Amino acid sequence: MYYTSSCDIGKRKSEQNERLPPAEAYVNEDSVSVLSFTDNHRDTNREVGLFVLADGAGGEDAGDVASYLATSTISKHLSEYVVDRLAGNPDGVGVDFPERILDTGDERSPTAAIDDAVQAAQRRIIEYARASEPDDVDPNNPFRAYTTVVAGIYDGNRLHYGWVGDSRAYVVNTAAERISPLTKDHSEVQQLLDAGAISEVEGMVHTNSNLIQRAVGGTSLSDPTDGVEVDTDSVSLYEDDVVLFTSDGLIDAYPDIDSLNRQYQAAYGDQVEDVAQTIRETVVTDDDIREIVVSSDSLDAAAERFIEFSNEKGGKDNIAVILASGSDLPPTPEDLPARGFEESAEADPAADVAQRETTILTAEDETAGATESQSDPAPDSAGDSTGESGGSDEAPQGNGSLVRLASVSESYVVADGETIGRSRRADVEVGALTDASRVHAQVSVTDDGVVFLDRSMNGTYYCHSSNDEWERVRETETPVLRDGDVIALGDVAEENVFTIEL
């Protein structure tokens, strides 16, 4: 087994530290732990690798401590598990023991052991947070310590792994030149992508891409017995595979996604694809990651190149990587199967790119985001709803509850449950609008009126007919609006404003 790891504070924070006094300087909040176990006897050689990477949440009180506690605690628990498993499996080294003295070892599955180890880290971090809080704790502002985690057991020709948050695991096959994402971010952006509410390119520059919905740790008011949900899986490995664990500092390298977001939101017609291509060339994608692994002469060279590449892109955040490859693995099959979240054997999906310091969403924060997945928008295909024809008054198929949205030049009929936006991903396409998101809002028609669930980047404005005051909602619902009230999809400009007709 071959492996390497590397950490870097990132170009931006390194430059900022040059202007800050030591007491105020940024620290690297990423943490990495790598352990290798080799068991040689007779003609056998068993190797097991433990890899743990954690990214402390920069917006919290002690992200650096949380990440350290995560990697050290998980490594401790998994190393005990691995040693017990090796000792309890003498068949692996050709030794026969009488059954009466045979120690079966730890009988948990590797993924169950990873889950248990992360739970132990959860308890440890909460205990630290509780011990760090002064006696006069402010219940509205408790001490907070959170981190993301990705951990794996590399055993034989299998990788068993688990993760919480937006640190990632990949496997790159250098012979097939394919990359397989093994994890999926526990983030608001990923939830919107899964729901079909935003496009892949929108995900790369989404203004909420720093918000994660799951992390290890808690506050000084948390109960140490509260667990955290861990996603786990196992995949087969082949002789041309390179396993990569990385913090989001690699994916988040470009520091100014806001400007790209504005360009994409303002684009329409043929401009959309031009801006999308600019975004793909500017941010870090899975294709970039694959190319670095495939073109590097060694794991050390790949790790060094990842740090350089991240800083060349802007080095917005700390970066940590672990790379590993195995020996005596099965040859890469000609029909290499898709693994993890790889979309197909032919496709290498581009990575969505986060930005800003990671922020943990509380249960209250998640309420609005959780509603995003309630209705999937229509796919890009023939038979899209009325908006495709450009302002048709023909009623779309729905449950019979309809609302008409009338602007100065167009009107659209929207059914209960349908989405409206400026692309064919929406059920009703309002292509003339430059400020609307691709899937801007979902409409709910009730006996009392109509409610718009905002699913956009820029927000939805509304104004009751009884007054002239505009209010804005973003990723939540408007109040019930009635006949004669108005909404604006994006900025309050004449071309974006619609009167509600029930």
Image (spheres, rainbow, N blue to C red):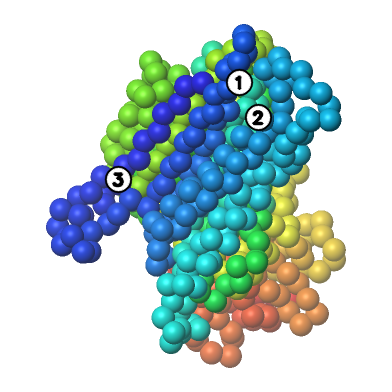
Mark 2, residue position: 86
Q: Taking 22 as reference, is 222 above or below it?
A: below
Labels 1 and 3: the sequence-earlier one: 3
Labels 2 and 3: the sequence-earlier one: 3
Quadrant, the C terminus: bottom right
Disc sitting over residue 10 in the figure: 3
- Foreground label between 1 and 3: 1
Query: How far, Cα to Cα, is label 2 from label 3?
Result: 39 Å
Q: Taking 143 as reference, is 85 above or below it?
A: above
Picture coordinates of residue 278 (x, y %)? 39, 38
Q: Residue at x 62, y 27 (%)?
A: 155
Mark 1, residue position: 46
Query: How far, Cα to Cα, is label 1 from label 3?
Result: 37 Å
Q: What residue type is labelled 1?
A: Arg
Mark 1–mark 2 contact, CB under 8 Å? yes
Figure quadrant of residue 181: top right
Labels 1 and 2: the sequence-earlier one: 1
